[in-house]
Image: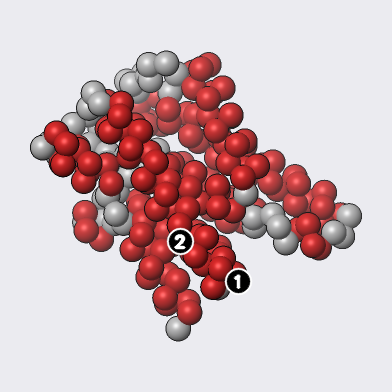
Amino acid sequence: MEYILVIFLSYLSGTIPFGLIITMLFTNKDIRKIGSGNIGATNVLRAGNKYLALGTLMLDSLKGFVPIVVTRQYFPELIELSSISVFLGHIFPIWLKFKGGKGVATYLGVITALSTQLCILFIITWIIVSLIFKYSSVSSMFASLTVFVVNFLRETVISADISLTTLMQLPDSKILFIFFILIIYTHKKNILNIKNKTENKIKI
């Protein structure tokens, strides 16, 4: 029963399309018909309103953060299940015919709940890569890869020292690897655009 409850509530939280709701409320426009058609913060920014984009980023992150915190409180052994469920809810929302966002903001909320250090690592990496390449997609993919690799190395070193107490405080690297693969999947169109030199650059 606990498994079903965690999956359902986490997925449900992830399906809330804040980008679509916010743009509808404040601009009376359908974000799915603007720019890339994505419901995430980056496309909201392309719609021309940085405040709505920031609001979308914060709310999409929050919907990833809250289920993990709640699950840790009541079902700590199901944190990984909650993490994957909320992320899948964002990229495959039932309300939008399973056509959701890229999942980066929700991923950020999830890893913030799992590890503040990894959250900071993701943000710093994202900023550095975006300053170099000017592509939000490249920054997101590279930052999620960095989070996985660093956590895996930490996990390996700690495991070698047999410090089980510390090891239990780290997110499972397998979960972070799954996130990385899913982020690659949600950015497959961006990868093709980069290859064809048609990807939009972000203005910094």
- Above or below, comparing residue 127 to residue 175 in the picture: above
Instruction: Name the residue nearer the viewer: 80 or 113.
Output: 113
Please name the residue that numbered disc 2 is placed on.
67
Counting other residues with Cα less than 10 Å from the Cα at mark 1, is it few (<14), some (14-19), or many (20 or more)?
few
Q: Nearer the viewer, mark 1 or mark 2?
A: 2
Q: Position of residue 144 (x, y in %)?
A: 55, 40
Q: Residue most toward the right? A: 161
Q: Residue 195, image x and y in percent?
A: 40, 24
Residue 196: image quadrant is top left
State the residue in front, 192 or 114.
114
The residue under the point 53% across, 16% down is 132
| Res 35 label | none
Image location (x, y in percent) of residue 181: 50, 47
- Quarter of the image with the N terminus in it: bottom left
Which three-letter amino acid code belongs to the residue tagged 2? Pro
Q: Amino acid at mark 1?
A: Glu
Q: Report which residue position mark 1 lands on.
A: 77
Image coords of residue 6 (percent x, y) = 45, 71
**Could you tell me how far apart the alpha carbons at marks 1 and 2 are, in whole angstroms?**
14 Å
Instruction: Out of 69 and 134, give the one closest to the viewer.
Output: 69
Other residues around mark 2 within 10 Å, as few (<14) / some (14–19) / many (≥20): many
Of mark 1 and mark 2, the one earlier in the sequence is 2
